[in-house]
Image (spheres, rainbow, N blue to C red):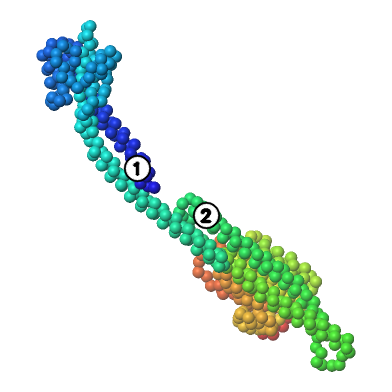
Amino acid sequence: MCALVALAFLIPLGISLGERTREEAIADAARRSALVTGALAVSTEPAVVQRAVEASGDDPATRPVVHGLGGDDAGRADGTALARAAADRRSVVTDVPGGVLRLDPVVLGDSVAVVEVFVPDAALDEGTTGRWLLLAAVALALVGAAVLVVDRVAARTVDSTRGLVQAALAVGDGDLGVRVEPTGPRELAEAGYAFNRMADRLVAARTDERELVADLSHRLRTPLTVLRLDADGLDSDDTSVGSFTEAELDRRRAIRRIRQAIVTLEGEIDVLINTTRKAVAHEAGPAMCDVSEVVRDRMVFWSALAGDQNRPHRVSGAQLRIPAPVPRAELAAALDAVIGNVFRYTPQGTAFEVAVSRRDGYVAIRIDDAGPGIANPDRALARGASDQGSTGLGLDIAKRVALQANGSVSIDRARLGGASVVMLLADPEAVPRQVNRFGLVGRMARDAREPKAEGRRWTRRRPSDG
């Protein structure tokens, strides 16, 4: 195909060059003829004309011949061509054996002389062979270059197609993180861009789906906490001591089944939240949220429940926007887990406080309560362990969220007398510098112990059991 294109381009070029060579040879004949016609215009003396003829060229075979002066005209032109040139009184170019003739008429008073100039085939074809050889070499070079270009284009096309196929197979196998580099012809590059957009939408769709499942689980757990608290307020379900009527036994067994079902449901929801949120965090990557907005939003729910249980509560420091490098749903789940522990493991009427602050490059969220406290904070922070006989998932969720934000979780004695759980999250707007995170926790604990009139108004001290 490339060779045909090159030939289609070069053959007309070669023909054009041949025609140009013929025109140049005839133009040279016209110049030689002009020397003689100029001399005839001055004088028709044979000697003058002869000198003009000899001056027009060195080759006797191609010197002009003058017809019509009455001499012996030994030319190549026939009478018909001479008569036509004389009658029309214009130059005539005619083919003869061995070349072409140029006939130029000259008016000499009442008669017309004709100057004949012969151009041999050798002069007409001079340089044509070399030009055709040059064109052939150019054609071969063009064909070679075309082959190289087509080979590279084909290689790029094959590589782009292979990469697109491999990426499609990877997505089909579940790897939604694969992307292609759009290369190759325009159509393949557009297909690469379309594939990347499709993969992004698939990731977003699966993330939204898992986030929906996690949010649904999270929403289920908060009313489940209320249900558990109500179940804890029911009578004892112990049937091993004492004598009971059949109706009382059935009632206590029903209470036991309710409590066991609640525990089982809490465990399943916790597992569901953990697995879905891990997948969402892994796929969605880093995110930002407003800590103050999350605290205010979650306290709307917990404040209503605290009012039902006569729990004094307070929120401080959550008026201004405070960003943190964690997804909003993750932080909400951590807050619910820690505050839910206050409701779960402290008696009704126990006060609690949620405070937000930022200093030393960290955002601190402190949850204090006036309960009995935590006897062994290290054990409580251990994954899957708790002093209350539970799975310890609440503090584990808080710890995971804090680590995700390059922070930490610590437990101290609250100024209310109970436990103080502090979550530290890296402040994305702070100037980076080296600080002691546990020093910040200590300062917050000291600040919490300072007497405040508003706090003393509703705080009730309880003896510590550890």
Mark whose residue sits in front, 2 or 1: 1
Look at mark 2 in the image and give the residue it sits on.
191
Locate residue 367, reporting x and y percent. Answer: 67, 72
Counting from the top left corner in percent of width and height, residue 76 is at 19, 22
Tag 1: amino acid: Leu
Q: What residue appears at the point 67 percent right and 62 percent down from the top-left corner?
A: 293
Q: Residues under labels 2 and 1: Cα distance?
A: 36 Å
Dot label at residue 157:
none
Q: Which mark is residue 7?
A: 1
Q: Quadrant of residue 5?
A: top left
Residue at 51% over, 52% down: 190
Q: Give the amino acid type for the residue marked by disc 2 in the picture.
A: Ala
Q: Earlier in the sequence, mark 2 or mark 1?
A: 1
Q: Give percent across and percent down for residue 260.
A: 75, 82
Question: Where is the C terminus found, in terms of image quarters?
Answer: bottom right
* Residue 252 visible: yes
User: What's the residue at 57%, 72% (across, down)?
Assistant: 403
